[in-house]
Image: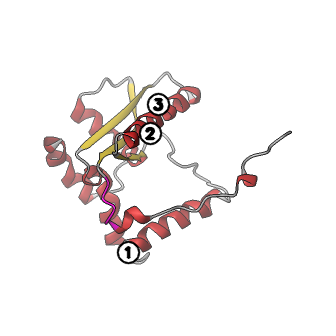
Amino acid sequence: MARFRAQLTPQFLAKPFGGTAEYDVYPPELKEPYRARRHKNGEDLYRLIGVTREDKAARHRQFARNYDFFGAPVGMFFFLDRIMGPPQWSDLGMFIQNIMLLAREQGLETCPQESWAIWHKEVVEFLGVDPNLMLFCGLALGYGDDAAPINRLRTDRAAIEEFAVFHA
């Protein structure tokens, strides 16, 4: 991990939003209510750590922390064979969630990071990954810091009636 950080961190800090992802992390025209929810989540997060919307440099520095796995001792990457489609993407999501749940069971914290998708070329090159595989995301794994203000974020949740219909 130290060699990875040493080689790539200067690039991440210089250009935290990297290149172009191989897939749209968010739909290009994100509709409501998803757009507003995403925006509010970001605003709430930056407010907790005292970064204003106008302070672009501080926002970029915080975003660049993704590429240090937020200081976690373990960073994982998840790849998909390029022939796989949306059904397999959901399988991978369930697999990642299982890892996250097992980590919590062991007293560890995780942070899934799709932000890695914009650095796919650099990660693939550094790791020597088969080009038939596509970087989907990273995952930070370690012990949580309950004293860190950012870890107090509790995102709003939609009412169950907004996304579920129950039939008796």
Residue annotated with mark 2: 101
Residue at point 41%, 77% (across, down)? 52
Which label was assigned to residue 95? 3
The crowding category of the residue bearing disc 3, from other C-alpha atoms within 10 Å (few below 14, some 14 to 19, many at least 20), is: few
Q: CA distance from mark 2 to mark 3?
A: 10 Å
Q: Quadrant of residue 50?
A: bottom left
Q: Which quadrant: the C terminus?
A: top right
Q: Which residues are magenta?
A: 144-148
Q: Check disc 1 and report its element: helix, strand or loop.
A: loop
Q: Nearer the viewer, residue 24 or 90?
A: 90
Which label was assigned to residue 51? 1
Q: Is residue 6 above or below residue 125?
A: below
3 and 1 marks in contact (CB < 8 Å): no
Magenta region includes residue 112: no
The main secondary structure of the magenta stretch is loop
Q: Check disc 2 and report its element: helix, strand or loop.
A: helix
